[in-house]
Amino acid sequence: MTSMPVGGIVPAHGSPDEGPADLVLRNGKIHTQDPARPTATALAIRDGRIAAVGDDRDIAALVGPGTRVVDALGRRVVPGLNDSHLHVIRGGLNYVLELRWDGVRSLRQALAMLREQAGRTPKGQWIRVVGGWTADQFAERRLPTPAELTAAAPDTPVFVLHLYQSAILNRAAVRAAGFTRDTPDPKGGQIVRDRAGDPNGLLLAAPSALILYSTLAKAPALDEADKKISTRHFLRELNRFGLTSAVDAAGGFQNFPENYATVTELARAGELSVRIGYHLFPQTPGQELADLRRWTETVRPGDGDAWLRLNGAGENLTWAAADFENFSEPRPELAAGYETEFEDAVRLLMENGWGFRLHATYDETIRRDLAVFEKLAAEGLFPDGNRWLFDHAETVSPDSLERIAALGGSIGVQNRMSFQGRAFAERYGAEAASHAAPVTDMLRLGIPVAAGTDATRVSSYNPWVALHWLVTGRILGGLSLRSADRLVSREKALELYTLGGARITGEEADKGVLAEGRFADFAVLSHDYLTVPAEDIPHIEAVLTVVGGRIVYATDTYEGMDEAVPALSPEWSPVAHFGGYQASVPPSAGGARQAGLVAEAAAESEEHRRWRDARGAVPAARASTVFDPCLAP
């Protein structure tokens, strides 16, 4: 199928000088985010960009014999979503190996999935549940135990990551990871032991998550061919939710250039379906400055193209300045004097025209970093036109926000509180939780804010879960952490998730607005984000996603219109059997469906009564009334 049958549009006999459009979308409720034209019903796309925006009648002249015309059927259309903090490269390299519990509603279902997967996982491979879920989403409101994992998969190693807080292993995984009673606790981590001193299957970040990541790194990796397939399917999964761009925040165990080779090869082949701006993260403590110096001498921010480009350094510049967040543990005390090396790193980047982003959860870290920036600003070196931002900033103070604004910084906020909000509130209190992160305060000061998820090892990659948190302040499980005055409107939240990401990569002239000359990146939604009940927002998906004029995802009415992707490999992949995010019925739709069934049953009952009445099967005295024995005298 090349297009939907559409009535009312016929090929134009006299097309504009530029020629007919390649693709036309009509009959939509288009939220353009363009102040000059906030709404429209039709778009015309030519050569990957928007050629025209208007009403169906305006766009009809751009339809030629070869134009693909798609009817939005009155659905909501939005600019393509742009996750400003997504570990998309790492997620892609591992996606087909992972059993995703994202969206799973009960621990019972999660364990059943694990048990089934154990039956098909070959010897030597692990079952990995790596982020995107929390106990609050389960009906049981608890984590699985090592014993439950062992019962579900006695012989196959199982590694279950819970946020940045802990990992749960079955007995086979403890053996495969090489943990014994003689294995020492690593710095910043704990191997929990039983009464005999043997590892019991629980690993704790205390507060460093390195123990979790280093253990996961012992599992087998994909070969190069399957890394490409895995990445393409992960990008398709992101397209499923209307994502068209992502900023990769790098991260631990993501080495440059080797771990970037897969997306680079896919970009060369024109096979990316999400535009990626990436960061570089020095991996080796003590070698950070050497790595940064080498990178500044070989590549520059902006190198690449519209599909894959370098954006800068981070989200760490030096390991000593990293404040690991585990809200089940006290805030980490960073080493005294880390500022000297940190200042050298920032100075090097500024002198070479590099921007950067910094993982900074706590205000204590932010204040120390700001003092370094202010010192360099006094010398005229900061920011010197370079983009920079803090990521996370859950406990940033009003004073720090004013200093960030004065220095021209931005902030990336993620919905980590959707998954960790209960632990945060239990440690720091309800008032502190209501400010984490203080998005409305940031906006009031004019600080550019970009929204994202921090997926895939803490939050889910589903952007609508993040948008729900921004709009309602509710975490998974329903707990409300924010008062009404600290919420943002649906329109503003969408702007943070589209234009916000574009601003931190310097692409706001191309992305985030559906206007003439911009990238043809947009999504047709399953439900109207701007009008559905708030509790339905996490259940929104795209039915059609377009990136650069290419239909990269299509379902429902549009099934078969999107580009093909290779078959999933390996065949035993959990994704091949369970898919990715586990969708469920929107709450309001579930209630409406139930009410509809009741109405149907009532109608059938009344029709049957009339049928019996017509045939004299009902006594005449009662033929025209409804008898309820509960009301009989």
Image (spheres, helix red, strand yellow):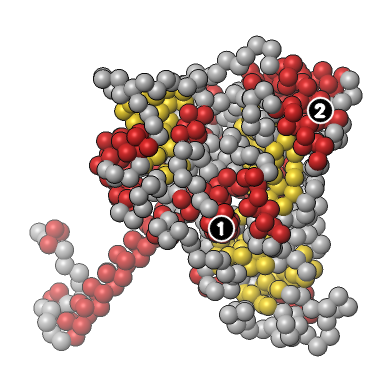
Above or below 606: residue 467: above
- Mark nearer the viewer, 1 or 2: 1
Badge 2 density bin: few <14, some 14–19, many ≥20, Cα 10 Å: some
Choose between 152 and 586: the one closer to the eye. Answer: 152
User: Under tag 1, what secondary structure?
Assistant: helix
Q: Residue furthest top?
A: 336
Quadrant of residue 522 within the rendered picture: bottom right
Res. 348 mark: 2
The answer to whether the residues at label 1 and label 2 have Cβ atoms under 8 Å apart is no
Residue beneath disc 1: 225
Above or below 39: residue 501: above
| Residue 393 image point, x, y percent | 63, 29
Compared across the picture, whether 148 is left or right of 397 comes to: left
Above or below 546: residue 13: below
Which kind of residue does numbered mark 1 sit on?
A: Ala
| Residue 317 image point, x, y percent | 70, 28
Which kind of residue does numbered mark 2 sit on?
A: Leu
Residue under the image location 82 percent in, 37 percent down: 297
Q: Which image quarter is the C terminus in? A: bottom left
Q: CA distance from mark 1 to mark 2?
A: 37 Å
Choose between 305 and 523: the one closer to the eye. Answer: 305
| Residue 11 image point, x, y percent | 74, 86
Badge 1 density bin: few <14, some 14–19, many ≥20, Cα 10 Å: few
Choose between 367 and 101: the one closer to the eye. Answer: 101
Q: Which image quarter is the N terminus in? A: bottom right
Quadrant of residue 43 within the rendered picture: bottom right
Residue under the image location 75 percent in, 80 percent down: 63
Above or below 380: residue 523: below
Residue under the image location 37 percent in, 37 percent down: 176
Compared across the picture, whether 288 is left or right of 211 comes to: right
User: Under tag 2, what secondary structure?
Assistant: helix
